[in-house]
Image (tube, rainbow, N blue to C red):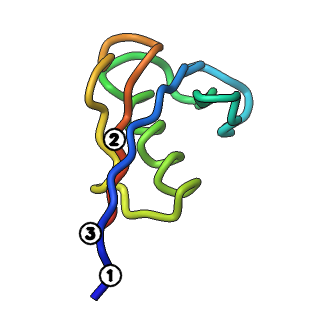
Amino acid sequence: MGRGYQVKIRVKVVPNSKTEEVIREDDWFLVRVKEPAKEGKANKAVIKLLADYFGVPQKEVVISSGFGSRNKVIEISET
């Protein structure tokens, strides 16, 4: 049985982007998503993209602060 882990990362989100990508910059990540920043669509896209990037299920990626901002703190865990 493996041990779980949890990490917090700082993220800057760019909604309405032409491409979807995750770029690591020193101690934070730039996340570009195609979805607009309306009705939580961009947040859902960020969670999906980061889950794919880190190879974890979407349920393990949580926005812990900045839900209504482009600057966010995201918690990623694996149990």
Amino acid carrying label 1: it is Gly
**In the structure shown, which secondary structural element does the residue marked by tag 3 occupy?**
loop
Disc marking residue 17 = none
Q: Nearer the viewer, residue 62 or 78?
A: 78
**In the structure shown, which secondary structural element does the residue marked by tag 1 occupy?**
loop
Amino acid carrying label 2: it is Glu
Residue located beneath label 1 in the image: 2
Residue 47 found in image quarter:
top left
Residue located beneath label 3 in the image: 79
Q: Classify 10 Å Cα crowding around label 2: few (below 14), some (14-19), many (20 and above).
A: some
Q: Residue at x 48, y 26 (%)?
A: 10
Q: Position of residue 8 (x, y in %)?
A: 39, 38
Residue 42 found in image quarter:
top left
Residue 24 left/right relative to 27: right
Q: Residue at x 40, y 21 (%)?
A: 72
- Distance from disc 2 to disc 3, alpha carbons, whole Å, reads 13 Å
Disc with the residue nearer the chain's start (2 vs 1): 1
